[in-house]
Amino acid sequence: MDITLKVVDDHNYMVESTFYYQESLYQTSSSSKSSLQTFAERFKFISQHSWVEGYYHGEAVNLDNYDLDYSKIGTKAYLVDKNDKKYPADISESGYMTFTDIPAAKEDYTLIVDIPSHFLYSEKLTLSRTIDGKVQGNFYTVYTDTVAAGDVNGDHVIDIYDAKLIANNAGISGDRLKEDLNKDGVVDIIDFNFVEKNFMSINPYFPTSNKPVEKTKNLTLEELKKSFN
Ligand SMILES: [Ca+2]
Ligand SMILES: [Ca+2]
C-alpha cells in the first residue's frame, strides 16, 4: 500500500522519521469498531529546505545591552544563493537571526550581515548534505565573528573620513544615527573611540582596493577628537 502524506513543513532533519502515535481501527456495517494491531516502519524524510540560525556580533553592539532591541537598530542579514537571490533573516530583539525555507542546494550560500557602521560581514556556508545521492536540507547553527565598528560611510576601510563624520555630529542625539555606533542614542566620544581603536583597518571579509586615509591637509584624528571636549 502506498500512502502519500502531507506535511506542514519539511523542517525535519532526522533523516528517518516515524509515527509516534499509531492506531488502526476498522468499522463493520453494524457500526461496531475494532482495533487492529498496528506497526508502521520508520520512514525516510528528505527535507528540501535548510534552516539556519545564530547571533550576529558587532563590536559596538555586542548584545550585552538588555535595554536595546537588536532587531531595530538597522541590522540586516541575508543568505545569497548562486543566482544572487537573497533570503533575509528574521532578527529577534536579542540579535538572533533565523533563516527558514532555504532551498537545499549543492552550491554554497553566502551569509551577509550588515550592521550599521560596522564592517560588512561575509561567510560562505554549505547548507545541504547529500544522502544516497540526494541533496537534502539541513539544520545549521552559524557562529559569526565580531565585526569591527567604525566604518560609518561603508567603504570597507576605517579612516579619517569616518572620524570626520562622527566628529561633525558630536553631541547629536536621535534614533538610528549612523554616527552613533553603539546605538545608545547619542554621538559622543565612546563612538569616536571605536574609530580610533580600529583606525586604518581594512575589511577582512570583503576584498577592496580602497586604502584607508590617515589624514588630509586639514584633518587629523587628534584635531577631530577635540570636537568632544
Ligand atoms: Ca569608511
Ligand atoms: Ca553612542
Image (cartoon, rainbow, N blue to C red):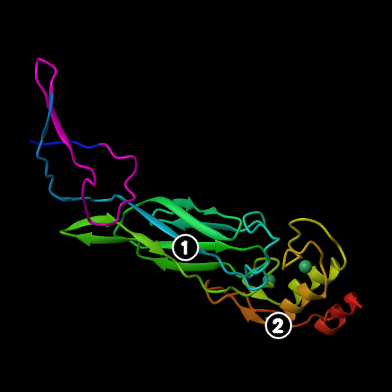
User: Between 107 and 13, which is closer to the camera in this rendering?
Assistant: 13
Ligand 2 location (quadrant): bottom right
Write down the quadrant of residue 22 in the picture: top left
Q: Is residue 218 visible?
A: no
Q: Report which quarter residue 125 is drawn in.
A: bottom left
Identify the amino acid type marked 1: Leu
Span colored in magenta: 6-32
Left of 5 or right of it: where is 174?
A: right
202 vs 129: above or below: below
Work out whether residue 10 can be spotted: yes
Q: Element at badge 1?
A: strand
Residue of label 1:
111
Please tell me which residue is depicted at 47% across the width and 70% down the height of the picture.
143
Give the left or right position of residue 152, taking residue 174 as reference. Answer: left
Tell me the distance, in whole angstroms, between the alpha carbons under discs 1 and 2: 26 Å
Residue at x 51%, y 53% (from the top left corner): 89
- Residue 65 at x, y percent in the picture: 68, 66
Image location of residue 190, percent across then percent down: 78, 75
Q: Which residue corresponds to mark 2? A: 197
Q: Is residue 208 magenta?
A: no
39 with respect to 70 (left or right): left
Dot 1 or dot 2: first in sequence order is 1
Q: Amino acid at mark 2?
A: Lys
Residue 149 x, y percent position in the rendering? 66, 73
Q: State which quarter of the image contains the C terminus.
A: bottom right
Classify residue 126 by image quadrant.
bottom left
Q: Main secondary structure of the magenta part?
A: loop
Q: Residue at x 36, y 63 (%)?
A: 108
Mark 1 Cα-neighbour bin, 10 Å: few <14, some 14–19, many ≥20: many
Dot 1 and dot 2 residues touching (CB under 8 Å): no
Residue at the extreme right? 229
